[in-house]
C-alpha cells in the first residue's frame, strides 16, 4: 500500500504531534489516551495504524566509528611523551585503582578524552562520594566536550540528590526493561499507615498495571510513561482491564469497594511521586534517553549516590545502570554503540555485575575505577592497569601511574 500523505519526518516529530493532539483534546474537555492520539495521528496521515506509520520512517543506520587509532593513556612525566596503547585489545579494558575518589575521577575524565575527541559515544557512571560536589565531575567532562565542539551532545542524569536541577530532565520509565522495575520505582517510599498492611498487594497491583502499560507501549511503539501507568491503574480500579488468572492472583483482584479505594490511593501516590521527582518523569523531555544516546553517540554523565537516603533515587540509578548494561550487550559491529563506558566507584551499587558487563562489552572500551587494587576477574591480562594517589598539582610530582611491562610509569592525563 502506498501513502501519499505528508507525515512527520521522524518518530521525534510524531511524538510532539501526538502530545499536541492529546493536549488539544484535553483543552476541549474531551480527554483521550496518548496511545489513541498516536493512532489518530496515523489515520490523519492515511496509515491504518501507528505501528505501520512508524515503520515507514526512514532510519539511517549510523556507521559506528572505530576505536581511536591511537588510544592515549596519558603523558609520561619528564619526557612529556604520549603513551599510546600498543593494540586495540590493550585499550579495551582499563582498571584504575585509588583510595581517593578525586584521583580516580581526574584519571578517568582524562581517559574519557579518547571518546570525546574521537567523536565517539561516552557513558560516564559516577558515584558521588560523601561531601563531594556532584557538579565537579560533570563540569570536567563538559569542559572537554565543549572544547571538542560537542556541547549539544552532552547530557546529565543526576540521581545523587533529590530536587537537583543539575541534570537534564528525562522519562526514566522509557529506560525500564520490566514491569517489576517500574513497580519498584513507585513501591519504595513511605506509604501511609492506613495502607501499610496492604503493601504486598500494592506491589502486585503496581506490577500488573505496569505490565499492561508496557505491553501497550511496545505494541503501539510509543514510550512508556507515568500517564500510561495511571491509565492502567484506573482500569484495574473499575474492573475494565482484562486480567489473566496469573495477573488476578498477583494483584489479589476483587471487585469490592475496598479494593477500588486501594487502587485510587495507589494512583494518587503515583501521581504524587511523579510531581515529587519531575526531572525523571518528564514526558516532554528533549533528551530521548539511554538507548537513543547510544544510537546518536552522545556523551552522558550519570550521577548516583550510595548514601543519598532516598530509595527512589536508588531505583532511578539502578534503572539507568541496567539500561546502560543492556545497551552494551546489544552492541554489534553493524550497530551504533557507546564507544567508551566509565564506571567510577560502583562497588556499593546493589546488583552491579561488572564481570557480566565486560563479557558482553563487544566493541566498547570499559573503564572501571574503584578502591579495590585487583582488576575485575573478567578483565583480560592485557588490560591497562593504573594506580593513582591524588589529583595532579603544581609541584610537578606525578599523581597517576600506569603499569607498563611490569613497571609503573608516572603519567599525567593532559595532552595537547
Image: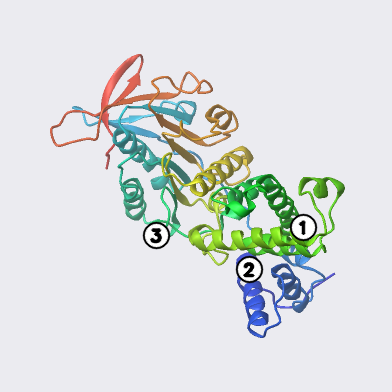
Residue in view at x 60 percent, y 51 percent: 175
Q: Is residue 46 above or below residue 262?
A: below
Residue in view at x 32 percent, y 27 percent: 99
Quadrant in the picture for residue 81: top left
Q: Looking at this rendering, what residue extends furthest in the left direction?
A: 395
Mark 3 residue element: loop
The alpha-carbon separation of the residues under discs 1 and 2 comes to: 16 Å
The alpha-carbon separation of the residues under discs 2 and 3 comes to: 25 Å
Residue located beneath label 2 in the image: 15
Mark 2 residue element: helix
Q: Position of residue 278 (x, y in %)?
A: 50, 62
Tell whether label 2 touches label 1 (CB within 8 Å): no
Tell whether label 3 touches label 2 (CB within 8 Å): no
Q: Position of residue 43 (x, y in %)?
A: 78, 76
> Which sits in the foreground, 3 or 225?
225
Residue in view at x 49 percent, y 27 percent: 89
Q: Dot 3: within a 10 Å radius of its alpha carbon, few (fewer than 14), some, or many (20 or more) residues?
A: few
The alpha-carbon separation of the residues under discs 1 and 3 comes to: 34 Å
Residue in view at x 44 percent, y 44 percent: 309
Q: Earlier in the sequence, mark 1 or mark 3?
A: 3
Residue located beneath label 3 in the image: 165
Quadrant in the picture for residue 273: bottom right
Quadrant for the C terminus in the image: top left
Q: Is residue 117 above or below residue 370?
A: below
Q: Give the label, 1 or 3, closer to the camera.
A: 3
> Which sits in the foreground, 273 or 113?
273
Residue located beneath label 1 in the image: 219
Q: Dot 2: within a 10 Å radius of its alpha carbon, few (fewer than 14), some, or many (20 or more) residues?
A: many
Tell whether label 3 touches label 1 (CB within 8 Å): no
Left or right: residue 124 versus residue 184 is left
**Residue 223 appearing in the image:** no
Amino acid at each position: 500500500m502506498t501513502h501519499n500523505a505528508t507525515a512527520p519526518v521522524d518518530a521525534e516529530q510524531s511524538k510532539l504531534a501526538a502530545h499536541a493532539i492529546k493536549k488539544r483534546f484535553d483543552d476541549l474537555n474531551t480527554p483521550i489516551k496518548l496511545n489513541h492520539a498516536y493512532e489518530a495521528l496515523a489515520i490523519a496521515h492515511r496509515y491504518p495504524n501507528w505501528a505501520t506509520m512508524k515503520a515507514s520512517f526512514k532510519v539511517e543506520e549510523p556507521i559506528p566509528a572505530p576505536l581511536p587509532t591511537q588510544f592515549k593513556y596519558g603523558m609520561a612525566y619528564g619526557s612529556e611523551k604520549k603513551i599510546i596503547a600498543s593494540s586495540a585489545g590493550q585499550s579495551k579494558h582499563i582498571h584504575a585503582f585509588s583510595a581517593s575518589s578525586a584521583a580516580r575521577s581526574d584519571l578517568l575524565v582524562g581517559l574519557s578524552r579518547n571518546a570525546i575527541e574521537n567523536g565517539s559515544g561516552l557513558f560516564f557512571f559516577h558515584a558521588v562520594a560523601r561531601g563531594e560536589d556532584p557538579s565537579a565531575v560533570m563540569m570536567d567532562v563538559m569542559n572537554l566536550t565543549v572544547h571538542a565542539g560537542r556541547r549539544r551532545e552532552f547530557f546529565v542524569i543526576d540521581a545523587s540528590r533529590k530536587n537537583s536541577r543539575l541534570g537534564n530532565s528525562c522519562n526514566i520509565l522509557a529506560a525500564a526493561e520490566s514491569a517489576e522495575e517500574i513497580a519498584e520505582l513507585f513501591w519504595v517510599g513511605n506509604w501511609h499507615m492506613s495502607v501499610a498492611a496492604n503493601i504486598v498487594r500494592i506491589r502486585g497491583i503496581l506490577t500488573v498495571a505496569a505490565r499492561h502499560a508496557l505491553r501497550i507501549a511496545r505494541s503501539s511503539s510509543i514510550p512508556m510513561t507515568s500517564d500510561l501507568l495511571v491509565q492502567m491503574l484506573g482500569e484495574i480500579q473499575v474492573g475494565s482491564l482484562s486480567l489473566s488468572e496469573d495477573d488476578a492472583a498477583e494483584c489479589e483482584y476483587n471487585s469490592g469497594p475496598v479494593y477500588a479505594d486501594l487502587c485510587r490511593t495507589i494512583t494518587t501516590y503515583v501521581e504524587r511521586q511523579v510531581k515529587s521527582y519531575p526531572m525523571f518523569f518528564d514526558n516532554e523531555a528533549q533528551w530521548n534517553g539511554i538507548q537513543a544516546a547510544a544510537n546518536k553517540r552522545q556523551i552522558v554523565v550519570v550521577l548516583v549516590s550510595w548514601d543519598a537516603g532516598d530509595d527512589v533515587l536508588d531505583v532511578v540509578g539502578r534503572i539507568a545502570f541496567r539500561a546502560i548494561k543492556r545497551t552494551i550487550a546489544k552492541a554489534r559491529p553493524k550497530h551504533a554503540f557507546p564507544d567508551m563506558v566509565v564506571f567510577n566507584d560502583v562497588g556499593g551499587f546493589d546488583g552491579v555485575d561488572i564481570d557480566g558487563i565486560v563479557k558482553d562489552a563487544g566493541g566498547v572500551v570499559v573503564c572501571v575505577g574503584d578502591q579495590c587494587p585487583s582488576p575485575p576477574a573478567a578483565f583480560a591480562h592485557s588490560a591497562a592497569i593504573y594506580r593513582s594517589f591524588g589529583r595532579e598539582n603544581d609541584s610537578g610530582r606525578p599523581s597517576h601511574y600506569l603499569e607498563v611491562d611490569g613497571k609503573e610509569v608516572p603519567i599525567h592525563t593532559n595532552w595537547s
